[in-house]
Image (spheres, grey):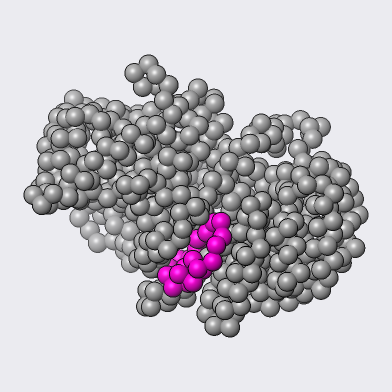
């Protein structure tokens, strides 16, 4: 299998040889039909197979190849497989259908045409997720000198001082604000009118608290370095408020930072903290200029993070819900879980039992929201497990010491016909064993006096979904707020009342037109509760752009209206996993549907395989869990299920990344950075 399929006319081979040889020097494998087609081989099938196996198809268009039906056929197949990379080596107009991608211009090409050839190498590297570090052998010294002069290392001070825009993102950006020379450069830029956007890792995040770095021989937590940087940045921000300073510095924090970015106008430098698998991002090309695909990709990466970041104010970072804490308490258990599910693990090794059970008592739900992950087909069945079945599966779950149980949906759990019996059963268990933790996710519309008393007394947490249908109907909205008041008045210190606010396309439009979401937040702020979670449904780029416009105003309203001891988890970033994603943390949570089938995934509704690992009415949980069905189930779900338009924006994938990051940190003795170009001042 070759990395690159080369399509060209044989008459052009001599003038293309320097390029082919350079590809080989870099370490890329190439395939051409010349010398690879022995007598008797089916030419068409061989070429089809090689195009399919390659990662990139470079088509060299010339006055010769434009007349070749073979080249046109190869280009057509490359387009259909999204591997097409056109290069013009003569002055011509491409045939209809082959010019929709801008071609690299290498007409009368020689080694002095640096920019176009570097552009070709960059585009190939992006498709191959590779990096070129060997330059063409002819005129190598001249090439190196020219390429290095473009790195602007010697002109670093001038670049910083004269920039009109700076985007700075990283874990700490410690040196940037603590080295006096660089800090003075930033002051000069601000005085001239530069706009600086600084985005740092949230000092309360897991990585900031747990990971240490060596500085001057001392082991410092990232948290310490971030807080020091923020102090310096705030001082610079206050300095920039004087009348003589034309620029400003804005500061935000975020829960996860995947790469370090320093953009000075048209020049961008980056270092990845871990591999970014996204189209258009060449994660190993450290210095890129405006106009290169990688420049735009990293700028988009910064803007996405900036739009969901939280403003950092003088009184400190805005609070976020530390969901990671409960996950990391069982870190050793999760390491064992990954070990048992990874490739090559002994088949006799038992998969650890889940730590949490999510039970869907029913598929009944009167709201029928368009964005529901369950799907209308299941909701239309109205299927519910009987109260007796609920008691039986509860017994089996508790028998194996799973003490964290959540009622969810599915449908709306409180629309179950025998919901009173279910609540009574859970209340009775909590009375006899106080260490049990029960929770419920509900729209709240069916909470009566009895249920509200039981939820406050016996449940560790209650999360109410304040969604579009409730917010848009005046009577439902009033009823929801009445229920919230009722629960809030009865709650005690041992339980947690939360509200989930889900932003949909209609809500975003209403916010843009009439501050609708902001008014919703003002309504709920009149009632005491513990935490607010703001999320968005999945949507296309247009929806994400509209959401980005209103997001700062929604956040400002939330933090201005809500009292200081509330925690806020606000994240509108869509959690799309890459094709290489292998889910293993899904086995940390089990889901029991209304038919009593067991699933190790919250997104099982959208699974192509529709597989379950067993029925809890028929078998014991331990027998189901160690039967060997879990691993293939997770593998079947990994990509399609997680990224389905109706999928849960998967917490599982986020927690898995958090754990894998910690595991990588352990392996590397506290260093989890990929080596890259070391540029002074960064």
Whether residue 283 is visible, yes or no, is: no
Give the mark count.
Answer: 0
Residue 667 in view: yes
The magenta segment is 517-545
Q: Position of residue 405 (x, y in %)?
A: 74, 52
Residue at the spot x=64%, y=77% of the render? 367
Query: Residue 47: x and y, percent?
Result: 49, 48
Establish if 402 lies above or below 383: above
Residue 545 relative to residue 463: left or right? left
Q: Quadrant of residue 391?
A: bottom right
Q: Is residue 425 left or right of residue 299?
A: right
Left or right of 226? Residue 47 is right
Closer to the camera in the image, 262 or 27: 262
Foreground pick, 303 / 523:
523
> 24 and 682: which one is in front?
682
Going 42% across and 43% down the picture, which residue do you hit? Answer: 202
Q: Residue furthest top?
A: 217
């Amino acid at each position: 299998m070759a990395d690159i399929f080369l399509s060209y006319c044989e008459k052009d081979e001599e003038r293309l040889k320097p390029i082919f040889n350079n590809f080989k020097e870099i370490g890329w494998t190439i395939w051409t039909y010349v010398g690879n087609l022995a007598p008797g081989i089916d030419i068409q099938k061989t070429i089809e197979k090689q195009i399919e196996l390659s990662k990139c198809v470079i088509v060299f268009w010339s006055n010769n190849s434009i007349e070749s039906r073979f080249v046109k056929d190869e280009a057509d197949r490359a387009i259909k497989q999204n591997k097409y990379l056109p290069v013009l080596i003569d002055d011509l107009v491409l045939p209809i259908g082959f010019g929709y991608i801008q071609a690299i211009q290498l007409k009368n090409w020689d080694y002095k045409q640096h920019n176009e050839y570097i552009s070709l190498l960059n585009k190939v590297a992006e498709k191959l997720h590779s990096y070129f570090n060997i330059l063409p052998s002819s005129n190598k010294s001249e090439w190196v000198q020219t390429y290095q002069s473009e790195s602007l290392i010697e002109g670093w001070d001038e670049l910083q001082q004269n920039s009109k825009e700076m985007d700075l993102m990283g874990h700490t950006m410690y040196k940037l604000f603590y080295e006096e020379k660089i800090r003075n450069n930033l002051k000069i830029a601000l005085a001239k009118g530069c706009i600086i956007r600084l985005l740092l890792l949230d000092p309360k995040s897991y990585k900031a608290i747990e990971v240490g770095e060596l500085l001057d021989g001392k082991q410092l937590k990232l948290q310490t370095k971030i807080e020091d940087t923020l102090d310096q940045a705030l001082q610079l921000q206050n300095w920039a408020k004087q009348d003589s300073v034309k620029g400003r510095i804005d500061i935000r924090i975020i829960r996860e930072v995947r790469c370090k970015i320093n953009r000075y106008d048209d020049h961008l430098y980056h270092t990845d903290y871990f591999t970014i698998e996204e189209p258009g991002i060449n994660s190993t090309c450290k210095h890129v200029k405006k106009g290169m695909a990688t420049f735009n990709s990293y700028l988009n990466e910064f803007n996405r993070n900036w739009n969901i970041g939280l403003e950092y104010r003088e009184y400190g970072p805005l609070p976020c819900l530390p969901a990671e804490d409960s996950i990391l308490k069982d870190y050793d258990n999760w390491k064992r879980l990954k070990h048992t599910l990874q490739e090559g693990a002994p088949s006799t090794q038992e998969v650890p039992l889940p730590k949490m059970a999510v039970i869907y008592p029913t598929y009944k739900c009167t709201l029928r929201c368009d964005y529901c992950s369950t799907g209308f087909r299941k909701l239309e069945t109205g299927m519910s497990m009987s109260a007796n079945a609920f008691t039986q599966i509860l017994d089996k779950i508790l028998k194996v010491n799973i003490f964290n149980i959540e009622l969810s949906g599915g449908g709306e759990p409180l629309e179950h016909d025998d919901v009173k019996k279910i609540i009574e059963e859970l209340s009775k268990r909590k009375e006899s064993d106080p260490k049990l933790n029960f929770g419920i996710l509900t729209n709240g519309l069916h909470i009566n006096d009895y249920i509200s008393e039981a939820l406050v007394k016996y449940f560790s947490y209650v999360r109410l979904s304040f969604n579009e249908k409730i917010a848009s109907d005046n009577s439902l909205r009033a009823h929801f707020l009445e229920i919230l008041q009722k629960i809030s008045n009865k709650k005690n210190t041992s339980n947690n009342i939360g509200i989930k606010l889900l932003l949909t396309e209609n809500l975003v439009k209403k916010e843009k037109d009439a501050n609708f979401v902001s008014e919703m937040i003002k309504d709920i702020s009149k009632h005491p509760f513990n935490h607010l979670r703001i999320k968005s449904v999945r949507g296309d780029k247009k929806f994400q752009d509209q959401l980005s416009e209103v997001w700062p105003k929604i956040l400002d309203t939330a933090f201005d209206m809500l009292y200081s001891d509330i925690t806020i988890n606000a994240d509108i970033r869509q959690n799309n996993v890459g094709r290489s994603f292998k889910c293993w943390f899904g086995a940390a949570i089990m889901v029991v549907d209304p038919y009593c089938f067991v699933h190790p995934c919250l997104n099982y509704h959208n699974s192509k395989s529709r597989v379950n690992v067993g029925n809890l009415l028929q078998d014991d949980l331990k027998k189901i869990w160690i039967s060997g069905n879990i691993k293939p189930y997770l593998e079947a779900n990994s990509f399609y299920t997680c990224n389905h338009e109706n999928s849960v924006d998967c917490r599982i994938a986020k927690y898995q990344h958090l754990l894998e990051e910690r595991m990588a940190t352990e392996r590397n003795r506290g260093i989890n950075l990929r080596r890259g170009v070391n540029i002074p001042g960064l």
